[in-house]
Amino acid sequence: MKEITAIIRRDKLAETKTVLDELGYPSVSIQSVDGRGKQRGAVCDSDLDPELPDKYCTSVRLTPTPSTYALEHTLPKVALFVPKRMLTMVVPDDVVSKIVKSLIKINQTGKTGDGKIFVSPIESALRLRTGEKDGEAIS
């Protein structure tokens, strides 16, 4: 068994849930989370999330460094955390690849803020209502 945790854009949630249901894996926990990546919450692309308030649409510029470009905020430094959705599901090992590929297909836009997917091993599972264990508990 594996646990798949996906942090995705809010506007991709409905489509993601639909595809997981079509794949036969509708059991998922969803949380509203705030976070930031390498860009430190700076957003210079308005379609990161069409529902984001203006405070996330900060002005940024790239400044050259010896080997690369550095992101420099032109506004005061503030810890901006962008709202996302975090999905967590436990699935059998043999379907992990299919689910991850589907998550990528739906959620990858190629722009900053697409999110992350993590896959972790699960030692055991137990369904509280029936006492079923492991594979039976997640089916």
Image: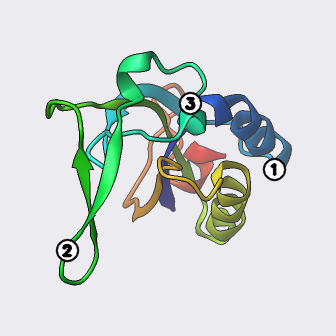
Q: Tell me if 100 is positioned left or right of 52 in this view.
A: right
Label 1, on which residue?
23
Label 3, on which residue?
49
Of callouts 3 and 1, the N-terminal one: 1
Q: Nearer the viewer, residue 94 or 42?
A: 42
**Residue at (64, 55) in percent of width and height:** 108
User: Please, what is the three-letter code of the amino acid marked with disc 1?
Assistant: Leu
Of callouts 1 and 2, the N-terminal one: 1
**Residue at (38, 27) in percent of width and height:** 56
User: Callout 1 environment at 10 Å: few (<14), some (14 to 19), or many (20+)?
Assistant: few
User: Callout 2 environment at 10 Å: few (<14), some (14 to 19), or many (20+)?
Assistant: few
Vertical arrangement, residue 13 with respect to residue 120, above or below: above
Picture coordinates of residue 115, whole percent (x, y): 48, 50
Q: Tell me if 21 is positioned left or right of 132 in this view.
A: right
Of callouts 2 and 3, the N-terminal one: 3
Picture coordinates of residue 29, whole percent (x, y): 52, 31
Label 2, on which residue?
65
Of marks 3 and 1, the one in the foreground: 3
Mark 3 element type: loop
**Residue at (49, 21) in percent of width and height:** 52
Q: Nearer the viewer, residue 131 or 107?
A: 107
Would residue 37 be seen by someone viewing this image from the given angle?
A: no
Of marks 1 and 2, the one in the foreground: 2
Mark 2 element type: loop
Q: Tell me if 105 is positioned left or right of 82 in this view.
A: right
**Residue at (43, 18) in percent of width and height:** 54
Would residue 117 be seen by someone viewing this image from the given angle?
A: yes
**Distance of mark 3 from mark 1, alpha carbons?**
26 Å
**Distance of mark 1 from mark 2, alpha carbons?**
46 Å
Q: Are marks 2 and 3 in contact (CB under 8 Å)?
A: no
User: Please, what is the three-letter code of the amino acid marked with disc 2?
Assistant: Thr
